[in-house]
Image (spheres, rainbow, N blue to C red):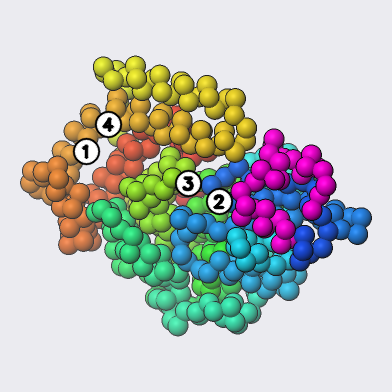
Amino acid sequence: MTSDAEDTRAGGTRREDLDPEWQRAFAWVEQELGGEIVSFERQPRWRPAFFVDLVRDGETLPLYLRGERGELDHGANPFEFEADVLRVMEDAGLPVPHIHGLIPDPRMIVMDKMPGRIDLSTANDEAERVSVLNHYMELLADLHSIDPKRFEELGVKKPKDAEAAGFADLATWESNFRAAKNRPEPIIEFVYGWLRRNVPKDRYEISCLQVDSAQFLFDQGRVTSFIDLELATLGDPAADLAGMRGRDLAEPLGPLAPAFEHYFEKTGVRIPKEVIDFHTVRFNLATPTTCAPFVIEPPAAADYIQYLAWYWVWSRACVEVMADAMGIALETPVIQEPAASGFSPAHGWLVDKLAEVRSGADDFVKYEIDTTWRTASYLQRVESMWPEMAKEENAEIDVLLGRTTQPLDREADLEAFVLGQGEANEEALLRFFQKRCLRHEALFEPVARELRGKKTQLL
């Protein structure tokens, strides 16, 4: 333990002021790795994580301590799975953080803090962006060349046939979705139906996949590390190209078509557009299915607007790729301007007050106040915009179903229609769901941040 509390101060927080569980984590690192933690910084996000500097034998070892997802866990894999995947990738010579161990209480993965930064939109210029993305495509091809048996040894099941390879990990996400489902979800059920009707049945290519692809750090024109491998699995390599289209919505990657061409040149195999489109829809669907229960019963730790935005933007991304694959032109609804009411002054005061308090807070508290401010800003627009939107949408549902629906039954009736007649009404439903998504996105549009106005890149 350090003798000087000032040496371990970060963001105004002293080590002895941390919660006991984090003090236990730091003590484990010092005991098991040897040395002394001289500085730390808590990563300002919902998931507990720390950057720490450990000095041993006169040298500083930068580390990253990555905690559990807690009540926001998607349940796809055991906590320690990501560490096992990173070890396999390190053995294959891929740039990943070295795993130093797993802290048992609280459960955290201890790994190297890798150099570089996220978000390719921050590249110094277009030449660096292209260089980094091409390097990533080469590394992705190398990942895909790892013997699938290495992932099987970690407990990953190899798809048994073409249909299983097409669905990949869909069953896991659907099982989690149905276990947590707490309201009718017509758009999700519609996409599930489309996937089952369109799964490729004449293609069986199996590779080790990153799944949540295009997650990497970079510096000086090169990828310095893969990150976030907790969803890794076995399946069609097309899935990782598809995942890049989903990642591009949150972290702009630039034009993907040239990057895909670079991958095809590296592997010598071209993947058909329709296969990438299918996997794009399948991959994108995992986001709204995961977010669905949280937008109805949000945990205290959640950034509510972030989950709401993920739900609606990635739902729309499914719709847009489906429509493109089918040659269907989609419509954009007319979005009315906010209308003032007698309640507007209270909403405005709350939004302004939270913004004022946020400006004077330290990093972690600022993050929590910011999530509350975003939610208040959203509710301000719901109050001033949704009544008119709802009238239009309810009328559209009545036309689709051919009868007048009632408020308490409307969503369940729409879901029943999707399940029973979705295939026969694909075009009409695609047009409706596109408008529904855009209406809801308009409600949080001023606080959507990186997701504002995003569209999936079409091939």
Return the residue at label 1: 393
Q: Earlier in the sequence, mark 1 or mark 3?
A: 3
What SS does tag 3 mark? Answer: loop
Q: Earlier in the sequence, mark 2 or mark 3?
A: 2
Compared to 44, does 447 lie above or below?
above
Residue type for callout 4:
Trp
Residue 94 occupies quadrant: bottom right
Nearer to us of marks 1 and 4 is: 4
Q: Position of residue 348 (x, y in %)?
A: 39, 20
Does residue 266 appear left or right of residue 403 in this picture? right
> 10 Å neighbourhood of mark 4: few (<14), some, or many (≥20)?
some
Residue type for callout 2:
Arg
261 is within the stretch colored magenta: no
Residue type for callout 3:
Ala
CA separation in Å, label 2 and label 4: 32 Å
Q: Position of residue 357 (x, y in %)?
A: 53, 24
Residue found at x 48% / y 36%:
371
